[in-house]
Image (cartoon, rainbow, N blue to C red):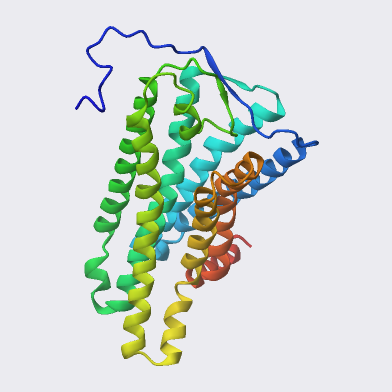
């Protein structure tokens, strides 16, 4: 108990600076062109995810449990991009590097919540593919609208709770070493290292968060596809296996786009240059939300048919 609440009940004055300074890139000329590029990616992301959400709402044939998860993925992508990119552009394009103390933690909360939700959405879609391929006759019993809504709601509740705990623990620290955050946003790991008092609880959360929102979801997804591959190798012909995996190509593409850059960054965090880390993490924040709707439109037959049908109606 003392580990997580050593400051509680004691007359301690917390040192809380009026603001933090987001440093961003170091020593890169003409870096503003990169932020203009992020703006372009953000616009494409907003248009694409809005289009996917609109198609799912307009086409009654897409109101299935699978597309509840797809809709939520598009919503999380749109919400996450809107939480990150406009603020990053305001900081670096308009030189508003000073961010008030409370605003910084609010910024962090929305960034981590949306990024975490994107990973857990991929878990929901992996489960959907598992049941659809391995238990096709029981699919409509095992994956119902109520089940998918409950699963998505529990994921949102989980990431909001975990992120709130992480943010609240940071507010119990005193910041007297520095106010400069060597990142492009209010990064959890960068902030708790600025504290001048003990920060074991935040350190534990900093280690636990990647496990809960990256490694465990990725492990579940990999186990899901290993089981699908093993089961199909026992009962299906080669043509049936190819046909089954074609229904998974969109999801597998999203998994690779989201997880690979993040895992590379976390694996080599101490070995890569801070500028490379910022580029990798910033692109990870904006590229999956931009590519997800494109991948689903190009690789998912139901959405392609729906788009063609809606286009003909409008014409």
**Residue at screen point 34% across, 68% down:** 223
Instruction: From the viewer's side, name the closer residue of 107 and 51.
Output: 107
**Residue at screen point 44% across, 39% down:** 112
Q: Residue furthest right?
A: 30
| Residue 199 visible in the current orientation | yes
Up the image or down, 227 lies above or below 58; here it is below
Picture quadrant where residue 167 is located: top left
| Residue 68 visible in the current orientation | no
Tally of numbered discs: 0
Picture quadrant where residue 178 is located: top right
Provide residue 74's location: percent of width, then percent of height: 48, 51
Up the image or down, 13 lies above or below 207; here it is above
Q: Which residue lies furthest to the bottom in this view?
A: 237
Instruction: From the viewer's side, name the closer residue of 68 and 164.
Output: 164
Instruction: From the viewer's side, name the closer residue of 39 and 173.
Output: 173
Provide residue 144's location: percent of width, then percent of height: 26, 62
Question: Residue 188 vs residue 81: left or right?
Answer: left
Up the image or down, 149 lies above or below 20; here it is below
Provide residue 264's location: percent of width, then percent of height: 54, 54
Provide residue 247's location: percent of width, then percent of height: 45, 74
Question: Residue 297 vs residue 166: left or right?
Answer: right
Picture quadrant where residue 241 is located: bottom left
- The quadrant of the rendering that contains the N terminus is top left
**Residue at screen point 52% across, 65% down:** 253
- The quadrant of the rendering that contains the C terminus is bottom right
């Amino acid at each position: 108990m003392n580990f997580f609440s050593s400051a509680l009940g004691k007359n301690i004055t917390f040192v809380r600076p009026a603001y933090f300074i987001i440093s961003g890139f170091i020593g890169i000329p003409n870096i503003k062109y990169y932020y203009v590029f992020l703006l372009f990616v953000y616009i494409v992301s907003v248009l694409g995810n809005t289009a996917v959400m609109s198609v799912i709402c307009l086409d009654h044939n897409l109101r299935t449990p699978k597309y509840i998860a797809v809709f939520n993925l598009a919503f999380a992508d749109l919400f996450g991009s809107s939480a990150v990119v406009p603020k990053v552009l305001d900081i670096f394009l308009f030189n508003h590097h000073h961010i008030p103390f409370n605003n910084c933690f609010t910024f962090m909360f929305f960034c981590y919540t949306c990024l975490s939700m994107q990973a857990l959405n991929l878990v929901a879609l992996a489960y959907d593919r598992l049941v659809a391929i391995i238990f096709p006759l029981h699919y409509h019993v095992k994956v119902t609208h109520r089940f998918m809504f409950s699963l998505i709601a529990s994921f949102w509740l989980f990431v909001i709770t975990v992120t709130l705990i992480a943010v609240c623990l940071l507010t119990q620290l005193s910041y007297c070493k520095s106010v400069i955050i060597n990142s492009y946003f209010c990064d959890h790991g960068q902030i708790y290292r600025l504290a001048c008092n003990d920060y074991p609880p935040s350190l534990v959360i900093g280690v636990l968060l990647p496990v809960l929102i990256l490694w465990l979801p990725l492990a579940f997804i990999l186990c899901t596809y290993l089981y699908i591959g093993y089961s199909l190798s026992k009962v299906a012909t080669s043509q049936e296996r190819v046909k089954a995996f074609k229904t998974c190509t969109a999801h597998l593409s999203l998994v690779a786009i989201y997880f690979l850059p993040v895992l590379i960054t976390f694996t080599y965090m101490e070995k890569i240059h801070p500028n490379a880390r910022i580029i990798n993490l910033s692109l990870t924040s904006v590229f999956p939300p931009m590519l997800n709707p494109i991948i689903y439109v190009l690789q998912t037959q139901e959405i392609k048919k729906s788009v063609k049908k809606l286009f003909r109606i409008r014409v």
